[in-house]
Image: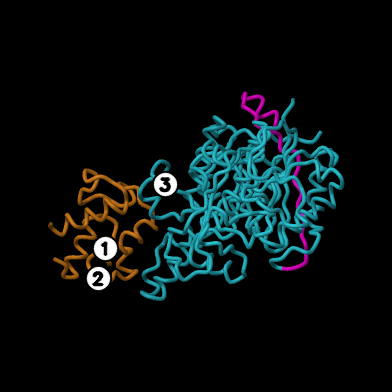
Amino acid sequence: MKRRVVVTGLGALTPLGNSVGESWDSAISGKSGIGPITRFDSSSYKSRIAGEIKNFDPLQYVSKQEVRRYDDFILYSIAAAEMAMADAKLTISPEFAERAGVIVGSAIGGVATLAEEMKSLFESGPRKISPFAVPAILANLASGHVSIRFGAKGPINCAVTACAAGTSAIGDAYKTIVHGDADVMITGGVEAAITPLAVAGFGAMRALSVKNDEPQKASRPFDKDRDGFVIGEGCGIIILEELSFALERGARIYAELSSYGCTSDAFHMAAPPPGHEGAARSMRIAVRDAGLNPEDIDYINAHGTSTPLNDLYETQAIKSLFGEHAKKLMVSSTKSMTGHMLGGTGGVEAIFAVKALQEGVIPPTINLDNPSEECDLDYVPNVARRQEINTAMSNTFGFGGVNAVLLFKKYTG
Amino acid sequence: MTLEEKVIKIVMEQLDVTQEECVLEASFIDDLGADSLDIVELLMEMEEAFGIEIADEELEKISTIKDVVDFLKQKGVQ
């Protein structure tokens, strides 16, 4: 019989708050976490707005020495993992340490440190490069530090599938448990890339919103005035456990992770194809592997980036898979409030999908004033909706043609 | 501030240790919990603070706070 996987702990740092509770409360209140960029002087940049994490004090979680040495993406991961482990009331004892693993995804790891060290290298030469530069840049060091901190000695990996990294990580962690290689996985996604290089680079691709005068209105998925995504940062970590392992230790179960669909577009390095067949196919795989029918899906936390192409093609993909049911299910993009947290998105949005299942509240798509012509689904516009649901899907798509989909369902024994 | 005091201040900051732990004979690895990367970073800070350069072969001979102080004196740092 297939091993079942449940979610038993949640931890997050987002532009909406420095915990899951705070972030979720803001999300269902329809608050925007977007504002002007404060991390660097962005006055010469086309896009000058971002979803930044605010008032985060890493000293709550690590020493001064660690703060100095680790890139923010590592600090965020440690903090969110601490919250998730505490939420799960889980301590990894030596008896099962080899059955506990870590996969935290990130699109570009320590890009801030990379840029700073390059500057030192050019200005002052190779002798000025810190011995802690390389381990602050490597994307898998989020997983590395989390494993060290909690003593998880089982499988370890890092997904670097761009904006799908968090979802790929959780999907791979799910498969690691199903396959029998671990009983516990600490998994999710992180990004701390509100840096000159990333903002300039995405800006050059014309991917970012330039609604600089109205930061809180800038991320407007499915709206006819959308003009690109707003860069965000964040981290979402969840604890996955094999069902019998969780039951045996009396863990509180938030939801079951019932399947993971992953496909490739094999089309273009950055753009999705019209109709987004690959996205529809990954959703179809998730539905099939959960043993469900398309009509059983109640809610989709969409990728919904607020770029002209994504939102249209994602809508087309949903319609192609769900047919008539597409008009009945709810689809919302919490990126309207968080911005696009790149590799962190999959972790945070998995948490929002799980919270929607647990609390029977669907977070809204804010700034949806005039849906664009072909975007005609129920996007839960502007106001959260109280509705009991049994299934919640989380879509994320990444550069390189990655389509990653998680399907959660209510745990009913 | 004496040279010893200046060195100890940097050691405390870099290795996150207390003044009490920083006796002159304290070994960075055995007594102050440092690893080889910590020592490289610590000595980079010394180079910066005292305007000197420490060659790799000299770095290998340094294992205690006293070694740093002696090295600096030898380089003419007051």
Image x and y of residue B62, in percent? 28, 60
Res A55 label: 3
The chain that appears cyan in the image is A
The chain that appears orange in the image is B
Name the amino acid, label 2.
Ile
Q: Which residue is mark 1?
A: B46
Tell me which chain the residue with mark 3 is part of: A
Task: Give the extent of the magenta segment.
Answer: A241-268
The answer to whether the residues at label 2 and label 1 have Cβ atoms under 8 Å apart is: yes
Name the amino acid, label 1.
Met
Q: How many marks?
A: 3
Question: Nearer the observer, disc 2 or disc 3?
Answer: 3
Image x and y of residue A254, in percent? 65, 31
Question: Nearer the observer, disc 3 or disc 1?
Answer: 3
Q: Secondary structure at mark 3?
A: loop
Q: Is residue A97 above or below residue A251?
A: below
**Disc 2 versus disc 1: distance between alpha carbons?**
8 Å
Q: Which residue is mark 2?
A: B52
Quick one: quadrant of the C terminus of chain A?
top right
Name the amino acid, label 3.
Asn
Image x and y of residue A339, in percent? 58, 53
Task: Say if residue A214 shows up in the picture.
Answer: yes
